[in-house]
Amino acid sequence: MGYETDWTDVEKGSPDCDCPAKCGSADIEVREWESSDGGHTDYHYRCKGCGKDWWAEGADA
Ligand SMILES: [Zn+2]
């Protein structure tokens, strides 16, 4: 549970590689977060260009 992975770079050109702040940076990192019961995984993104961070919901197990 908690953060399952360290920050890793999102592949350039992937749909996830799009800063919602539209800062123009393509340097996005992501890490996985798992709920305490292990049944839910979310993805925590952050932009290295402007520092914006956001979440995306993963599939329920
Ligand atoms: Zn940004």
Image (cartoon, helix red, strand yellow):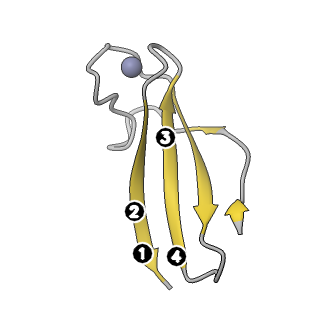
Which residue does the image show at 60% across and 72% down from the upper left? 35
Q: Return the disc, 1 or 3, that comes first in the chain's sequence.
A: 3
Q: Which residue is mark 1?
A: 59
> Do the CB atoms of the residues marked 4 and 2 lie less than 8 Å apart?
no
Question: Which tag is nearer the camera, tag 1 or tag 4?
Answer: 4
Q: Is mark 3 within 8 Å of ligand 1?
A: no
Secondary structure of residue under mark 3: strand
Q: Return the disc, 4 or 3, that comes first in the chain's sequence.
A: 4
Q: Residues within 10 Å of mark 1 (few under 14, many from 20)?
A: few
Q: Which residue is mark 2?
A: 57
Q: What's the distance in space between the residues labelled 1 and 3, CA to CA?
A: 16 Å
Which residue does the image show at 53% across and 69% down from the upper left? 41
Q: What's the distance in space between the residues labelled 1 and 4, CA to CA?
A: 7 Å
> Do the CB atoms of the residues marked 4 and 3 lie less than 8 Å apart?
no
Q: Please state which amino acid type lies under the numbered disc 4.
A: His
Which residue does the image show at 47% across and 14% down from the upper left? 49
Q: What's the distance in space between the residues labelled 2 and 1, CA to CA?
A: 7 Å
Q: Is mark 2 within 8 Å of ligand 1?
A: no
Q: Which residue is mark 4?
A: 40
Q: Residues within 10 Å of mark 3 (few under 14, many from 20)?
A: many
- Residue 53: horizontal and vertical position, in percent? 45, 33
> Do the CB atoms of the residues marked 1 and 4 lie less than 8 Å apart?
no
Q: Return the disc, 2 or 3, that comes first in the chain's sequence.
A: 3
Can you tell which mark lies on residue 11? Answer: none
Q: Which residue is mark 3?
A: 45
